[in-house]
Image: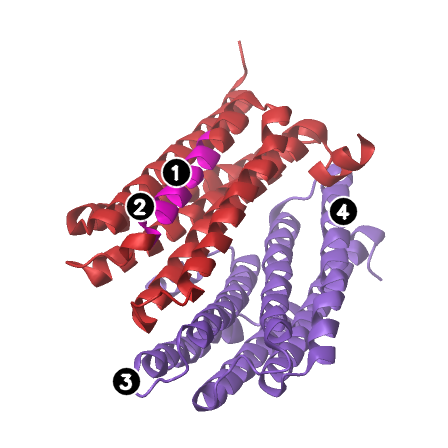
Chain colours: A red, B purple
Amino acid sequence: MRDAYHEELDALTDKLVEMTRLVRSAISRATTALLDADLHLAETVISQDEEVDRLFAEIETSIFDLMARQQPVAVDLRMIITALRMGTDLERMGDLAQHVAKVARLRHPDSAVPPELRATILEMGQIAERLVTKTGGCIATRNVESALELEQDDDAMDRLHRRLFKILLDSGWKHGVEPAIDVTLIGRYYERYADHAVRVARDVVYLVTGSRPHELVADA
Amino acid sequence: MRDAYHEELDALTDKLVEMTRLVRSAISRATTALLDADLHLAETVISQDEEVDRLFAEIETSIFDLMARQQPVAVDLRMIITALRMGTDLERMGDLAQHVAKVARLRHPDSAVPPELRATILEMGQIAERLVTKTGGCIATRNVESALELEQDDDAMDRLHRRLFKILLDSGWKHGVEPAIDVTLIGRYYERYADHAVRVARDVVYLVTGSRPHELVADA
């Protein structure tokens, strides 16, 4: 049986995994709200970001408490430090999903996404979900190999982001400036969401190995 | 005389202040590079971001080292944890200055900023500099009052950000989609730069008082 101290550390992991579930659900609903101009769905994303913030506040409190009482060392110390960083990134991913939902709300009853961009945005949303699902798995299982793969998965998001600008700058673009601004920001939100998922995965690598991913790749 | 342990903690503070100096210089040069379409200056910002990254890597190494060897508690523990967070935010501010410089480089020999937006962007750059200067002062002196003021200073950035969108969406806008995209992203970079400066200031408040700024304000 685990002692109380290690149970608290395990609880930290569980809460981080729960954060990945919440921010995955948020980006999924935000994407649908955006594409379907679904005001109600957008509102749920906006209001439920509080849950993500509350969970992160709990994680922060546990961490400061654990550090003050237990003076953790070695891998436990790495766990606590990386949990704080992972929580910070996941909290930000919640904010970014909320930003997407706010654009949906702002343009309701219209959709902020013109028809020729729907497929690209849908795919960005799907990749964002896939990344965060994988990140959650990495946190739960401490799978380094899977965590290292996330960097490549993120390349798909960067490709979509470039495709989006290509469509915006095409001479056939006839929606004017306002939708271009919306889509520029939306694209940035998805791209940053993915970047934060990759950072969390990098912290899993550091947690397990004590090395940064670039050090492992340089060694390989 | 301070012992070696506390000298190491002081060195952390010095390095964080040095990071604020570097990212202040970076955003200052990036703004000039953008407005003057100065390719050489843009290149210096882009290449010198490595210095910011290196300094942050040093801070991270010291922190992990201090935690492993010293098992810090109470205010020292808060110092170490907040130093890690502040370093993360400052490193990101360096990236954002670099992003601004990259837009300048991309559009060279043209300027990415149409004439009617120059004054707004210039002011955003000035406020960014003022915020980070103040943040650096807060880190060095641990001045809570000054740190709490930064939230208001950031409101000025938000106002400029809104003015920027107003100009972009004005019927008189005749520069088309590409400059609108550039300016949307540039505006976002300045706004995020300011947000990170405010986060660092909040961490100073937490470091000194053990309370979050919103708790202090609620108490007032």
Badge 4 amino acid: Thr
Badge 1 and badge 2 in a common chain:
yes
Q: Which residue is mark 2?
A: A31
Name above or below for residue A144 compared with residue A81. above
Q: Earlier in the sequence, mark 4 or mark 3?
A: 4
Q: From this viewpoint, is residue A83 visible?
A: no
Secondary structure at numbered mark 2 = helix
Q: Earlier in the sequence, mark 1 or mark 2?
A: 2
Q: From this viewpoint, is residue B11 visible?
A: yes
- Which of the image's four quarters has the C terminus of chain A? top right
Left or right: residue A157 compared with residue B100:
left
Badge 2 amino acid: Thr
Chief secondary structure of the magenta portion:
helix
Question: Which chain is indicated by disc 3?
Answer: B
Asked if marks 1 and 2 touch (Cβ < 8 Å), the reply is yes
Badge 4 and badge 3 in a common chain:
yes
Q: Name the residue furthest top.
A: A1
Name above or below for residue A116 compared with residue B110. above
Badge 1 amino acid: Gln
Badge 3 and badge 2 in a common chain:
no
Q: Which residue is mark 3?
A: B171
Q: Position of residue A127 (x, y in %)?
A: 44, 38
Left or right: residue A160 compared with residue B91:
left
Whether the magenta-drawn stretch holds residue A129 is answered as yes
Question: Which chain is indicated by disc 1?
Answer: A
Please tell me which residue lies in front, B130 or B26.
B26
**Which residues lie in the magenta part?**
A117-133
